[in-house]
Image (cartoon, helix red, strand yellow):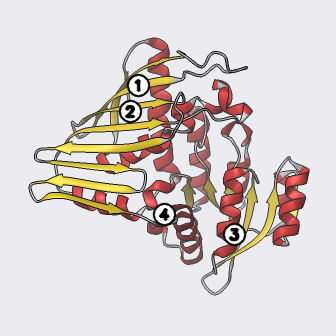
Amino acid sequence: MAANKVRVGMVGTGGIGRVHLANVNKIEQAQLVAVCDVNEASVAEICETYGVAGYMDYEAMLAAEQLDALFICVPPFAQGTLVEQAAARGIHLLVEKPIGLAMEEVEHKLKAIQDAQILTSTGYCLRYLDIVAQAKAYLANKTIAMVRGHYLTSFVQTPWWREQAKSGGQLVEQATHTLDMMRYLVGDVSKVYANAALRVMEDVPGLDIPDVTSVSLAFSSGAIGTLDTTFTQPDHRTGVEVLGKGFRLQISSRDLTIVDAEGTHSYSSTLDFYLAQDAAFIRAVATGDETLILAPYAQALQTLKVTLAANESAKSGSPVTL
């Protein structure tokens, strides 16, 4: 396929879908050929802007178009069997996070992916930051004692986001980025214990998700950690701090700080990590080099498993062993 452009389709033309649309349009190896969304006006606008075919039904799009790659940019509750149907046609997939809301469901999708032997990427775009690669290299031969993560932000107005049954709550839908970063730098999680509450945002109509959550994590390596998340704040702060004997590494948004015996060193990134993620996926499809993809579906499944376990722990009041 290296000699030809990768023919790309997209399901979901909302906020993140439009980011991917703009990126695909910039990538030399890619050719956007079709989009699908339930919003007819949005589809019409995209078709006019990019000169592509438009659909309101993904089954119709899959049947009519010869696609090499598909971007799935709809909430997990709206995915249906899209992953399975696309995989059965041999179409490589980039699936936005969260990839699902139940482990049985995503394990079924993973089996379909593995049976089809297609390439997959997921929306954990922060893995593509250059400062994250630098942090991972620094930590490679070090024993990590503790990791601390936070995702502290304001309320999201999107109607489905406030419903547990549709979003999985903030931990599954938003703070999953921070949890995934913790896993990427420190390794797999073996046990979780969480506390969550709806403390101050009960005046929001239709809201049934906790507005504060704190998760205690035990990692398979022996490291311990915490992750705190809330949507009660007037601003947005997110970050991960990794501590070991004689060193501290902190990623805060686009900034990396390392403190050790050699002093304090700071680095900043200007990289467009969304574009880097999409370009890596397209290159992987074009060349067959799966090592270009930093967050395949199987990795996203492991991150989802931790956040769902944390929700389970918060509900039951007991730790959950993974």
Q: Earlier in the sequence, mark 2 or mark 4?
A: 2
Q: CA distance from mark 2 to mark 4?
A: 26 Å
Give the label on residue 68, or none.
Answer: 3
Residue named by callout 4: 293
Q: Earlier in the sequence, mark 3 or mark 4?
A: 3
Compare residues 189 and 158 and report the one nearer the observer. 158
Q: Classify mark 1: helix, strand or loop.
A: strand
Q: Earlier in the sequence, mark 3 or mark 1?
A: 3
- Depth check, mark 3 against mark 4: the one in front is 4
Q: Amino acid at mark 4?
A: Ile
Q: Earlier in the sequence, mark 1 or mark 4?
A: 1
Q: Residue at x 83, y 68 (%)?
A: 49
Give the label on residue 227, or none.
Answer: 2
Q: CA distance from mark 3 to mark 4?
A: 16 Å
Q: CA distance from mark 3 to mark 2?
A: 38 Å
Residue named by callout 1: 214
Asked if the residues shown at circle 1 and circle 4 are in contact, with their CB atoms under 8 angstroms apart, the answer is: no
> From where the camera sits, is residue 11 visible?
yes
Q: Amino acid at mark 2?
A: Leu
Q: Classify mark 2: helix, strand or loop.
A: strand
Q: Is 197 left, or right, of 138 in this rendering?
A: right
Q: Is 56 left, or right, of 106 in this rendering?
A: right
